[in-house]
Amino acid sequence: MSLLPRPVSQTTDASAPPFRLSAHSVIRTDPSAATTARILAEALRASTGFALPVEPIGTEEVVDSVGTDITLSIDPSLSTTSGAYRLTAAASGVEIVGADADGVHHGTQTLRQLLPPDNWAPMAGAQDWIITATVVDDAPRFAYRGAMLDVARHFFTVAQVQRFIDQIAALKLNHLHLHLTDDQGWRLEIAGWPELTRIGAATAVGGGEGGSYSADDYRAIIEYATARRVTIVPEIDVPGHTNAVLAAYPELNPDGVAREPYTGTEVGFSSLDIHAESTYEFLDDVFTQLAAMTPGPYLHLGGDEALATPEADFLHFARRVSELVATTGKTAIAWHEFGASRELASGTIGQYWNYVSPEHGHADKLRSFVDQGGQVVMSPADAAYLDMQYPDIATAGLTWADGPTSVERSAVWEPTDIVEGVGEQDILGVEAPLWTETVPDVQTLEFLVFPRIASIAEIGWSERRAPDWSDFRVRLAELAQSWSAAGIAFHRSPEVSWLD
Ligand code: TNX
């Protein structure tokens, strides 16, 4: 099996005896990788039916330690890059050494790609599951490798979000950006502001029933993600995209009159009252609570498409709200429009959504974050947006970003080639957003996300090289066998020669 994302190096020796998983296999682990060991054991028990006990390293008896064990350990001297690992598979066992706990987790995902794809299928049984003798040495290119899920336009349950976390973690993505609020819905309970969820969460695009996460629900998502080495990046989108708030709390409207709930798909018509102190008291409470609920270092404050906010007001708001988020102790991330302000809290991160070839004005706004001491996350809409239609089928997705977007186009762009003056050191990473105006259910979600999510995984992880679509599409077809085994409803694009 070949690997996706492509590793730094892989050598195989077909003449050496292979590793063989067996009913006697034990997963041995360093205590600091115990969660990763448990998750690996649960997954492989489900497919193999083997007992696969998890035991601490060092407790093995010499007689039974021969040949079939999987050993997880941490060695910081392996690499200074977080997430780096070495995997060795041989007749004597599988050894995964991570530079840190993230590295061990990544090594286990590589192990699952080296095993037959059926290791993703419940009750597959493990007839002759062997791995050719191999050594993989690997480390990520970018620290931030993300996906975004818009739970505001259509709501997705905790269990559905957790399934999505499993799917992205398998590709070594390590950030899930949750777009929690928009015109059509406010999806997170905030203490002291009951109407946000009573009124603001009752709607969705097309008149669906909406929904929201309680504090316990949010904690369940965080815990599930953390165990899989995924950082949750919550977004409260302001000052535009706020109709749901403005429907819930009339005092946040410039005219003091509550807005009607909105279930359409227009953007750019709503704005918080930029000149009312009550706006900042509200936002201070929301971001302070959100910071306390969120272990990760980032809070995303949106800032995109604030077309109903006059320019001078927008600049005033950008300064104040970036400062307010910085005061919580978190690093703010904003869509690149916020770069119009030269008074952002130092270190604010910009997320780029314009095209691979920037339209007028967008590149300057992104560069502004770097000038102000921040890094950037690259999500060029014409290549990285997962909600763009495919060229061959128009049942789901939008086309505004020079769409439709082929799998090839999603795979062949280079983050450092987009904005002049924004290079490798300035780029924290890459992210593929799924906006859900046209995504009412998990089936549609998986159809749009897969296979194009594999592109962002490769661009975020693998060392820079000239894009090689012909090599990528072959590995993609192999990877998709595991999607079939896992029951993922991926799009069988005619651009790829699928293997089943
Ligand atoms: C643009 S680009 C948006 C979203 C929409 C999306 C649909 C950006 C930051 N915002 O509000 O959902 O297009 O593709």
Image (spheres, grey):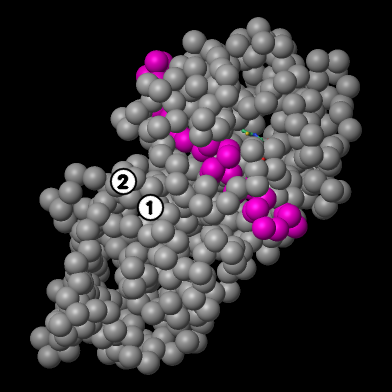
- Disc 1 from disc 2: Cα separation: 8 Å
> What amino acid type should be assigned to the residue bearing mark 2?
Arg
Q: Mark 1 points at which residue?
A: 468
Q: Which of 257 and 94 is in front in this view?
A: 94
Viewport quadrant of the N terminus = bottom left
Image: magenta residue range? 370-396
Q: What residue do we see at 79% from left, 39% from top?
A: 265
Residue 50 seen from this side = yes
Give the secondary structure at mark 2: loop
Image marks 1 and 2: residues in contact by CB distance under 8 Å: yes
Residue at left offset 84%, top offset 48%: 206
> Residue 95 at what x, y percent from top left?
20, 70
Q: Position of residue 444 (x, y in %)?
A: 69, 60
Q: Is residue 103 above or below residue 180?
A: below
x and y, in percent, of residue 134 in the image: 20, 72
Residue closer to the observer: 246 or 349: 349
Image-quadrant location for residue 157: bottom right
Q: Which residue is at a point 38% across and 48% down the rendered structure image?
A: 467
Horizontal side, residue 86 vs residue 173: left or right: left
x and y, in percent, of residue 330 in the image? 45, 30
- Numbered mark located on residue 465 in the image: 2
Q: In which quarter of the image is ligand 1?
A: top right
